[in-house]
């Protein structure tokens, strides 16, 4: 299961809106926004001259209905997924979710 989905589970337990600045968290927010699982304001990836810039911040405003459905699906899948979630959470804790 992609780490961005574990991040989605994490977002369910934090107060929104949430400003994130860690590059990994901004990347997770970008993926979740692109897939329609959250709404977020993320700085543009390119400037007016077309030069690419990595976004430094994102403000996650809400989990969408699709995101809530995905969370429900992850939490209600068979036991195999529970083992995957357990392994993933233990590895994910090593990165900061602040």
Image: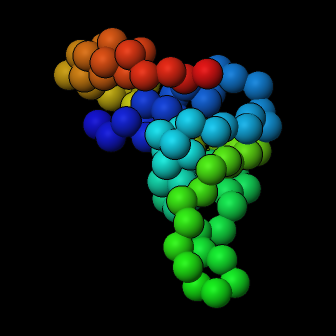
Q: Determine whether 60 is above or below 91 in the image.
A: below
Please give left or right for residue 54 compared with residue 94 in the image: right
| Image coords of residue 71 (percent x, y) | 50, 34
Q: Quadrant of residue 55?
A: bottom right
Please give left or right for residue 17 compared with residue 13 in the image: right
Q: Residue at x 29, y 37 (%)?
A: 1
Front one among 77 and 42? 42
Front one among 29 and 51? 51
- Most extreme residue toward the left is 80
Look at the image and name its color scheme.
Answer: rainbow
Q: Quadrant of residue 4?
A: top left
Q: Residue at x 54, y 59 (%)?
A: 54
| Image coords of residue 52 (percent x, y) | 53, 73
Q: In which quadrant is the C terminus drawn?
A: top right
| Image coords of residue 63 (percent x, y) | 66, 42
- Most extreme residue toward the bottom is 49
Q: Determine whether 51 is above or below 72 in the image.
A: below
Q: Quadrant of residue 19?
A: top right
- Residue 72: in sight, yes or no? no
Q: Residue at x 31, y 18 (%)?
A: 91
| Image coords of residue 6 (percent x, y) | 43, 30
Q: Residue at x 67, y 57 (%)?
A: 42
């Amino acid at each position: 299961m992609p780490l961005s989905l574990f991040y989605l589970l994490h977002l369910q337990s934090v107060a929104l809106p949430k400003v994130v600045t860690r590059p990994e968290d901004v990347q997770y927010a970008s993926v979740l926004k692109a897939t329609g699982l959250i709404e977020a304001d993320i700085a543009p990836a390119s400037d007016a001259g077309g030069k690419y810039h990595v976004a430094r911040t994102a403000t996650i405003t809400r989990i969408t209905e699709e995101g809530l459905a995905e969370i429900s699906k992850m939490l209600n899948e068979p036991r195999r997924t529970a083992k995957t979630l357990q392994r993933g959470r233990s590895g994910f804790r090593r990165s900061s979710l602040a």
